Amino acid sequence: MKNLFRPACLLLYLLTLIAFFFGGMTMAALTGAAKDQGLAGGAIVFFYGVISIGMGFVFAMIYCFYASDKAVKTANWSLIGLIIIVAGLMAYNYNERQKEMEKKSELKKFNYIQNEGKFQTAGFDLNIKKNLNFKKDEFEDTQMGLGFFKPNFFEKPVIYFYGQPNLEKSFQELSPTDSIVTAQAELGGFQITNAPPWLVPEHLKMDYDILYFKVISLGRDLIEVEVNSTNGQTGYMDRSAGEIIFWPEFFLRINSVEFLDPVNQKVLHNNVDHASEVITLYDLMRPVLIQNEWMQVELYDDSYKVTGKGWIKWRADGKLLISYSLLS
């Protein structure tokens, strides 16, 4: 048995353990044995390595029993070469995986915003339909809905969409049909990392954490929103996944509004159609009170000094009569 414990043989055993273990794991990776196996993939690769150790160790003992010292030393040098080759393959595979991860990381910097079949990056200031500003020439025939739905990215990084619900079933029985995936941006705030190709919300500017959907109808658990403001497509979302902002509350949050038809629309002293007009110079109107279809506004000049106040009609026949900007 002394032939099995020669120094050269002991080195052969050690080199065999190293070479066959990592060689088996590399073979598993190259042949795709653990592909699409989820969490079990790592265990499968490790198992390949262990099996290879057993086979290699048996081979090394048989070889040492019959081989001369010179032959064993030659085998050791061969194994050292094999280990170097395996190490090189593992380093190559690691670098390839890192490159793939970097590519995926770059993809996560995109907001998937549909614009005539193309997608724009998150940093591109793209106004889809009325991204930040409500424009009369584009929307004079558009129904206003109930207000807006603002998803809560902090608590719900994945926002799900649902198909037409069966109101006789509970919300828990519904299965999502699609989703928006968000992640925190490097400089703060959030960015969309994945979204359906048809997604064109009412307002979208992620560098200001602005993502508003127009609310069409409201249920106990679900909320129907307009998911594509270019064609009126709607979908359902979990109403607890964000905040519902009805029109009165929305206007009280923004800084200013403007008339859609300044020639025929006037600021009045009272909230009745036959009230007299407020005669004063002003540059902007700031909402301060909402009462049905009427809005009380404060009037400011270009230096942001109050010049007066009055009432304006902000809606009629289910349509908005005023425009607004989210960032002004």
Image: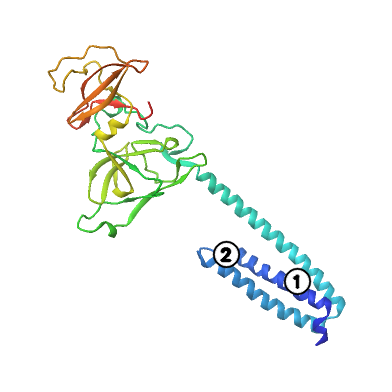
Res. 237 in view: no
Residue ID at (27%, 56%): 171
Res. 181 in view: yes
The residue tagged with tag 2: helix, strand or loop?
loop
Residue ID at (47%, 44%): 184
- Residue ID for mark 1: 15
Camera-nearest residue between 86 and 155: 155
Residue 295 badge: none
Is 295 situated above or below 45?
Answer: above
User: At label 1, which amino acid type do we have?
Assistant: Leu
Residue 32 badge: 2
Q: Quadrant of the C terminus?
A: top left
| Outermost residue toward the right in this view | 70
113 sits to left or right of 98:
left
| Outermost residue toward the bottom in this view | 1
Q: How many marks?
A: 2
Residue ID at (58%, 48%): 102
Q: Categorize mark 1 by other alpha carbons within 10 Å: few (<14), some (14-19), many (20+).
A: many
Image spot of residue 159 (x, y percent): 37, 49
